[in-house]
């Protein structure tokens, strides 16, 4: 009887313990279920997206002309300052004419020499005609006359060049973008002035091989500058390089802007937009895009049929309201996670919210 009582007491103790173990298992199951992240997903779509590409580059003058002396000389006057606008044919520099005097003396000497030789030739020819002298003497003097004429022509040409180079004019209309000397300086290796034509101006951008096929001469471009806010300056593609840059694997494309009001100056930083047509691309909600900190890369979580998610790197295109164009990295049939990404990892199992 005593043994029976002991057994009954032990059984009474075990029954609550069994109940505790069952509750613990249920609690663990609930906890495990709670640890599965709950997410919302969305189907990706496709649509025709305008392929407007943006490029950055620096403005260049359409033409650049260096004003220099033909030979080393002292600068007498400079009539323009850096930044000043000049017209074609405008006098901009006067050089010292000391060399001109020397060249003028050379011309005078050459004329005197020619006159003297010409006189000797005329005398020899008259003498030969009346039976005196020899034909050889006449021929020799005739050769000297020809040589003297050549010397005079060369001296006159040198004087003329010196006179022309004493007063320097601008061959183009434009802006003075460099002034390297002051009056009284001797000219050196640098040009005295640099004059840049700024109507029109040009911007040379670099485009990829894939983009090149969509670009053609004459196609319109829109250019903006930080200096002028959102104002668009119209331009056109005027030159496409036929060769690829070996290092960057890009092609140079020249965009010309009329710049009729002269507001665009060489050295300004511009943004060029070209409309390269339309392309049918995948589009996802902007909430699906996850930016990886520190790398600049963008990802989306793709929901798989087995209830897990895959971390996929994507290349973003244009922002389209509350969506993004996807250039690459995502198939058209994908389902993407749009909420709850902070608790996810590659391959993690998820529950989809109803």
Image: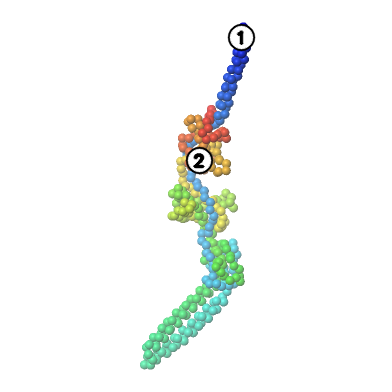
Q: In terms of image quadrants, where is residue 292?
A: top right
Task: State the residue position of label 2.
Answer: 314
Q: In the image, what residue occupies the spot 53% across and 32% down?
A: 348
Confirm or deny contact between disc 1 and disc 2 (CB under 8 A). Answer: no
- Where does label 1 land, which residue? 3
Mark 1 or 2, which is nearer the eye?
A: 1
Residue nearest the observer in this picture, 280 or 261: 280
The residue under the point 59% across, 50% down is: 229
Toward the top, the furthest residue is 1
Q: Position of residue 286 (x, y in %)?
A: 54, 38
How many angstroms separate mark 1 from mark 2 (CA)? 75 Å
Residue at left 56%, top 26%?
33
Q: Residue at x 42, y 82 (%)?
A: 146
Vertical placement of residue 331 versus 183, above or below: above
Residue 233 point in image, percent of width and height: 54, 52
Q: Is residue 117 visible?
A: yes
Q: Is residue 9 left or right of residue 58?
A: right
Disc 2 packing (10 Å; few <14; some 14–19; many ≥20):
some
Relative to 25, is 329 on the left or the right? left
The x, y position of residue 166, in whole percent, is 55, 73
Q: Nearer the viewer, residue 20 or 102?
A: 20
């Amino acid at each position: 009887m005593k043994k029976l009582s002991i057994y009954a007491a032990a059984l009474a103790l075990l029954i609550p313990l069994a109940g505790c173990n069952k509750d613990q298992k249920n609690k663990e199951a609930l906890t495990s279920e709670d640890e599965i992240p709950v997410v919302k997903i969305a189907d990706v779509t496709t649509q025709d997206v305008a392929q407007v590409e943006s490029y950055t580059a620096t403005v260049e003058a359409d033409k650049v002309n260096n004003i220099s002396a033909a030979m080393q000389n002292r600068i007498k006057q400079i009539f323009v300052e850096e930044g000043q606008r000049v017209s074609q044919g405008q006098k901009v520099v006067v050089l010292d004419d000391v060399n001109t005097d020397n060249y003028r003396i050379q011309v005078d000497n050459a004329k005197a020499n020619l006159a003297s030789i010409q006189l000797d030739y005329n005398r020899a020819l008259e003498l030969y005609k009346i039976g005196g002298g020899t034909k050889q003497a006449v021929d020799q003097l005739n050769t000297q006359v020809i040589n003297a004429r050549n010397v005079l022509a060369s001296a006159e040409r040198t004087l003329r060049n010196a006179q022309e180079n004493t007063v320097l004019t601008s061959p183009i209309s434009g802006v003075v973008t460099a002034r390297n000397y002051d009056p009284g300086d001797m000219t050196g290796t640098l040009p005295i002035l640099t004059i840049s034509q700024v109507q029109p101006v040009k911007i040379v951008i670099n485009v990829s091989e894939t983009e090149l096929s969509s670009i053609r001469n004459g196609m319109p471009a829109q250019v903006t500058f930080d200096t002028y806010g959102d104002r668009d300056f119209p331009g056109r593609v005027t030159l496409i390089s036929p060769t690829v840059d070996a290092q960057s694997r890009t092609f140079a494309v020249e965009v010309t802007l009329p710049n009729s009001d002269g507001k665009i100056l060489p050295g300004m930083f511009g943004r060029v937009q070209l409309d390269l047509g339309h392309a049918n691309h995948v589009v996802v909600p902007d909430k699906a895009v996850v930016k990886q900190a520190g790398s600049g890369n963008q990802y989306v979580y793709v929901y798989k049929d087995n209830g897990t998610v895959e971390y996929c790197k994507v290349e973003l295109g244009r922002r389209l309201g509350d969506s993004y164009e996807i250039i690459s990295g995502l198939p058209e049939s994908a389902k993407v996670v749009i909420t709850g990404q902070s608790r996810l990892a590659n391959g993690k199992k998820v529950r989809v919210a109803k």
